[in-house]
Image (cartoon, rainbow, N blue to C red):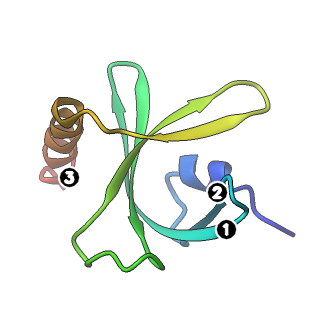
Amino acid sequence: MKKNPFLQLLDENNNENIIFTNDLGEKIEFEQVALINLEDEKYAILHPVNLGFADDEVIIYSIYSDDNNYELNEVIDDDLKEEIYQEYKRIYNKR
């Protein structure tokens, strides 16, 4: 059975890589680094596995959803990226 990648993404207990299909039909595999809630928005910090990124490079996506649809949009605003990163550090440095 094919797993819904968005449900995997939102599952805090998921530890498997997630495979999304982009608009061109290409499959892209990601390692989920973190799921961050910030000001009533959800953000995913993902590491692309098969795109040649360095081990410490990530992409931050905002997650939008309604009853039946999910959408990821890359965060491009540097100030917002920094806010998300600071929240990530605040959460994960406590562990």
Q: In the shown orientation, is residue 37 left or right of residue 78?
A: right
Q: Mark 2 points at which residue?
A: 22
Q: Quadrant of the N terminus?
A: bottom right
Q: Which of marks 3 and 2 is nearer the N terminus?
A: 2
Q: Which of 66 and 52 is in front in this view?
A: 52
Q: What distance separates the C-alpha of mark 3 from that of mark 1? A: 32 Å
Q: In the shown orientation, is residue 90 left or right of residue 31?
A: left
Residue 37 lies, in percent from the top left, at: 37, 32
Circle 3/circle 1 CB separation < 8 Å: no
Q: Mark 3 points at which residue?
A: 92
Q: Which of 26 and 87 is in front in this view?
A: 26
Q: What distance separates the C-alpha of mark 2 from that of mark 1? A: 5 Å
Question: Would you identify the image quadrant in which residue 74 lies?
Answer: top left
Q: Please say if 7 is above or below 24.
A: above
Residue occupying image coordinates x 74% and y 34%? 69
Circle 2/circle 1 CB separation < 8 Å: yes
Residue occupying image coordinates x 52% and y 59%? 13
The kind of residue tagged 3 is: Tyr
Q: What distance separates the C-alpha of mark 3 from that of mark 2? A: 29 Å
Residue 89 lies, in percent from the top left, at: 14, 48
Q: Residues within 10 Å of mark 3 (few under 14, many from 20)?
A: few
Residue occupying image coordinates x 68% and y 52%? 23
Q: Which of marks 3 and 1 is nearer the N terminus?
A: 1
Q: In the shown orientation, is residue 38 left or right of residue 13?
A: left
Residue 85 lies, in percent from the top left, at: 19, 44
Q: Name the residue under label 1.
A: 26
**Mark 3: which secondary structure?**
helix
In the current view of this chain or complex, which residue is farthest to the front? Answer: 24
The kind of residue tagged 1 is: Glu
Q: In which quarter of the image is the C terminus?
A: bottom left
Q: How crowded is mark 1: few (under 14 residues within 10 Å), some or many (20 or more)?
A: few
